[in-house]
Image (tube, rainbow, N blue to C red):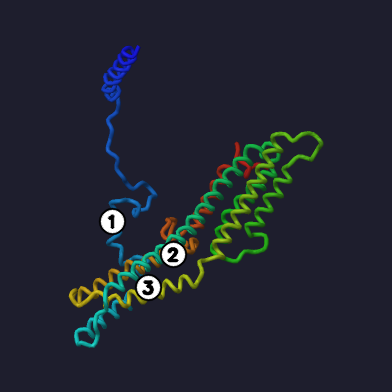
Amino acid sequence: RRLGDGSRADAARARSVQLRPTLSRARPDAPARTPLRLEASEGTPDGWVCDAWLGNLVSVPRSLILRRIAGHLLFNVAVAAAFVRLRAVGWAKDLPGAAHSLTGAFLGLLVTFRTNNSYGRYWEARTVWGGIMNTCRSLAIGASVWITPRKPAEARGFVEALRRYPTQVAIQCRKEPLDDGDHPADVCMSLQNWLHRAAPPSSETAAGLYELQLAAYSRHVDRLTDATGALNKIISTPLPISYSRHTSRALSIWCGTLPCAIGSSVGPTATIVVVALVSWLVLGISAVGELLEQPFSQPENVGEGFDFGLPVESLGRSVADEIERLGTREGGALAAG
């Protein structure tokens, strides 16, 4: 019996060995595989492509980050030049580099922690906007499929109110003043009123599928109300100002004393160049964190790209156009009536 089991196992292994080349053999009619290439598609920022390093390097003088830190960078370069001159005449001495290296490690953690928290706020804002887009699409489809055949006038009013919501949210993100009735919460109340008008008269019979759909849409409107509150939290609750001030002071002291820690062996010109490069790197990372801390600070004239914030105007217009497209059914909820 043991020999029989062993012979069967050997035969099974032999069959598997014979089948492996057959399974790995390509079919003659199969299309040839082309190598994967990363190319820029239409509407894709060039900075997301690996081959755009040359353009990114050439555009450094036009960088927004460089313009934001230009004053601080020039100050550090001036301090480095003054120290080099004083060291040449013997009025200044070098400092031990070990202490500067140790504090640099802690400072790197401080800047990284600040940048990570800022990016967390940026990603939270983008997630909320993504939920707004999905919810508005669902409501527009529901109005077209369920409400328009039964209550076309109510469906038209519902879709019109829904179209206002993303644009009003974009205005709220910019902290621009809103009139009474134009706040996103007021738009959500208007949506609930239109759903109430579209509902059939209450009766003692069990609710049908139409009534259940209206109840689901009411919960979707509640999600839009929650999204408004989540965006308000991001807008009105920045990182503590003491944390930003402490980081700025630490960076200023560390970059200002960097020429003293480099030493005289590097040379005067190299000292100034190293201070400029290191200051640009460290201060640039800190400036990126400051921009991401307020994800709605990107001006409208920058464009529709995600340069250093969320293009809320572009997002609001795209959602409104999508609602207008989906909120129509054979002539449209907007044109019915």
Q: Secondary structure at mark 2?
A: helix
Quarter of the image containing the C terminus?
Answer: top right
Percent position (x, y) of residue 146? 66, 37
Sequence-wise, the earlier of marks 2 and 3 is 2
Residue 144 appears left or right of 2: right
Whole-Å distance between the Cαs marked 1 and 2? Answer: 26 Å
- Can residue 71 be seen from the camera position used here? no
- Closest to the camera, between mark 1 and mark 2, is 2
Percent position (x, y) of residue 75? 33, 78
Residue matched to label 1: 53
Give the amino acid at mark 2.
Answer: Arg
Whole-Å distance between the Cαs marked 3 and 1? Answer: 28 Å
Percent position (x, y) of residue 294? 49, 64
Badge 1: few (under 14), some or many (20 or more) residues near its Cα, within 10 Å? few
Quarter of the image containing the N terminus?
Answer: top left
List the single residue furthest toward the front: 2
Residue matched to label 2: 114
Sequence-wise, the earlier of marks 1 and 2 is 1
- Can residue 48 be seen from the camera position used here? yes
| Residue appearing at x 76%, y 39% in the figure | 200
Tell me whether circle 2 and circle 3 mark residues in contact (CB < 8 Å).
Answer: no
Give the amino acid at mark 1.
Answer: Trp
Residue matched to label 3: 251
Residue 134 appears left or right of 106: right
From this view, report whether residue 310 is shown above or below residue 131.
below
**Total marks in image:** 3
> Which of the pair 221/164 is nearer the observer?
221
Percent position (x, y) of residue 156? 66, 45
List the single residue furthest toward the right: 204
Q: Secondary structure at mark 1?
A: helix
Q: Secondary structure at mark 3?
A: helix
